[in-house]
Image (spheres, rainbow, N blue to C red):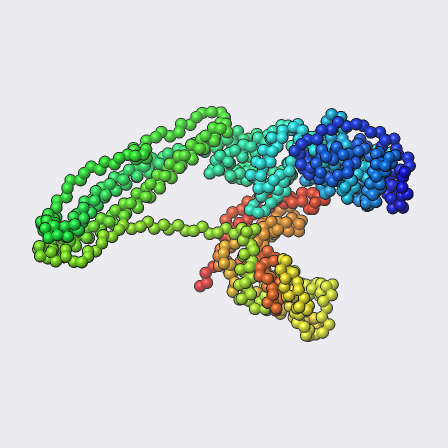
Amino acid sequence: MKNKISQDITEKLEYIGLNLEEIPATLKYVEVLNFKPNIGIEENKYRQYRYISPKELEILLTPCNRLDDTKTKYSKAKPLVSYLEPKTEEEQKLYETFLQMLKDVEIDEIKEVEQQQQALTKKIPFKVRYSKNYLWQIYYSETDEKYFMIVPTQDKDYSTFFYVLKKQLEKKKAGKIFVPISNIDYSKELLNKTEIQSLENYLWTFTNDWPSIYEVYDKTDKISLQVVGQTQILGTIKSEYKTKLSNKIEASKFFKLIKALYIIQSELSEYYKFDTQIDKQGEIEFYYKDQLLKYDELGDWINEQYQKMVNIENEAIKNNQEYNQKLKLLKEETGKLEIDYIEKEKQISTFLECKKTFFGKVKYFFKYSGKKSKKKEEKKVIIEEKTNLEKDYKEDYVEEKIKKQYTLDELLEQGKNAKNRENEFNNTKMDINAIKLKKVNLIKKIENAVAFIEEIDSHKKSIFEFWKYSNKDEVNALAEGEKEVVNVKPHAKTFEFEEDFEEFGITMDHIQRAKLNKEELDSIYLTTTNQLTVINKVKTNSLEPKELDKYLKELKAEQKKSNQDIDEEIDIFGNLEEDTRKTKKLANKSHRENPKNKFLILGLGKQYKVVDYKVNISQVIWRVNDAINKISTSEDIVAYMWTDEDKTIDANEINVFNLDAEYEIEQAIKNSESSKINLYKIKLEKGAHVIAFSNCVYFDNQNKTLPEGMDKDTRIMVKLSDMDIKLNSKKNVKIGKLENDEITSKLDIKTVSILEYTVKQMEEE
């Protein structure tokens, strides 16, 4: 028995077009499905997106949640008609469930789905997936060759279900909906599952981002493989990319190219590191040292690299031969020095032993007395050859094979041979350095031994004098050779924004609080606002007539809009706007400080004139200049600034750079109307004068409760006018960002000219 229906549900039924008293025959017809769920496929991971007709969907309702496994949902599912005609007590409960679902859904939610599908009919989203796509629980029975929809009744959003039901009840042609297909694997039409999984791994290696790979069928049921993700273009700067592979040949070439590059980089990482870029369509590209790599040209590139590896190996062989000759000579020289040292060491040992007894002293005196012993004829030094490096090193260079095409295996083999030869050469250089040190030590030891023996000989004029000398309590010890001095310049730590920014912010904020006064911090705050343009125009004397008057009018209009008019000529509260007992949050840290106010800092009042404005701005300039000379960075840092293509940085201005490269690029893409922009990357060496836009710049710290750090801003002020600036490199890349997450969002691609400079503080005269 059907319950009385509320007015709200009646309106929704009318909107859908469903009369519960007369269930349409199309809903009563139920086709028995033979569906076998794919075990092991995640419920929330989709591999296929298709355009399908809502009128052809079989609708099943199940007392489950959408996150339950497919087997459970399908086993408990019943046809929609079971929820519409309550003939039994069980069906009455199902009917009440259907009414509750109607009660929970809003007509506006159904309309949103309709608007979304209208947009999807015109365009497939850049990322393929779209918001709330998980609400579509649509499956495919291969046996029946039929799509069906499972509606979990325990969910709270039924908008997609009622949208499909509305379309099925409409008499006009329903069109098609673009939806993900649940619990289905890749079709293997373009790439098989193993290849796709490998492709995901390869792309992650090159992009440091896990891609999404979908099989997408258009309205004509034509398949394409769409690879979507992000790739690192420069440091932490990322770009969106999407590669569309429309046929098996394209997919195979794309896969083989990336597989080959992955193998080369993995096996020969000492020689190869491949970079990624995007083209003007937003598709991913691969580069080796600014050379674009394409599958059709990969054979020629492999030939070039094979020859390069041959040259590297031959150069290593040549160098190793030369250094082995040097090593051989050094070993011969060192061997002679060892014999000389051993003889002198033996004489000294004899003296030390003989001085213990009377007869020993007499024996030593007469053995080594008179003229110095004639030098013995040098013995031939026979050095036992323990390794191949100590032999006369003669090897033939690598013979160049004449082949039309080298394979990837041959390149890898030749690359490993080249590396082995370079390792041999490096080992020879290490051996030379070691034996040079040994030679220096031996020479020093021999010098010490000679000095010791000469000291002994100087007391051998008579047996009595020698007797007296040898009875001394102690004799100067034989000095050891010099120890190796390792003079390796430590590498400067590279500033990594994600890892180092927090510590850098705390350090700079602490320094700035200690060294800068309130007036200086207020002036610095103004450079974080739209007043920076005015400040720089005054600083560089580039104001047009009446331009300052225009800026003042804009400032007063802004003040009026913000409801911060100052009625009195003198504000007795100064910068105190709020009760300082009120607790505020800054990056989840509590404090009781007031934010700075540019109108109050400038003293903006009703009688405020252009001359007052210019005087105040001039004071800001010299205060900022004094402040920045007090502060310097305690480490090397990297900062970024974007400009339009036709604009350069004026070193005489107050320049503001961002430590967050990715955010700076996002701002460039968002705010620049040009398709080409500049990105200035400066490497500031330790000691450079900078000011960080830290917390003390944005807040007064009257109560001493302000947390230390840079919690509001990632920018710094840099005084370039007294810096030594050197251009290191310039390169062009393309970066793509989506405007938003909407279906209609386009990939905004900018050509970015990256200019990299090294900047260090000039020494004061």
Q: In the visual, does 679 lie left or right of 341?
A: right
Instruction: Looking at the picture, tell me which residue is in the foreground, 584 or 377.
Output: 584
Residue 56, position as x, y percentages in the image: 80, 31
Q: In the visual, does 90 lie left or right of 231?
A: right
The answer to whether any part of residue 159 appears in the image is yes
Residue lying at 58% horizontally and 44% vertically, measured from the top left: 233
Residue lying at 74% horizontally and 40% vertically, measured from the top left: 65
Residue 142, position as x, y percentages in the image: 72, 27
Residue 543, position as x, y percentages in the image: 63, 62
Residue 466, position as x, y percentages in the image: 11, 55
**Quadrant where the N terminus is found in the figure:** top right
Instruction: Looking at the picture, tell me which residue is in the foreground, 139 or 211.
Output: 139
> Does residue 455 sit above or below 555 in this rendering?
above
Q: Tell me which corner region of the image, top left, top right, bottom left or bottom right, holds residue 35.
A: top right
Q: In the visual, does 74 lie left or right of 632?
A: right
> Does residue 745 sit above or below 468 in this rendering?
above
Residue lying at 64% horizontally and 66% vertically, measured from the top left: 592
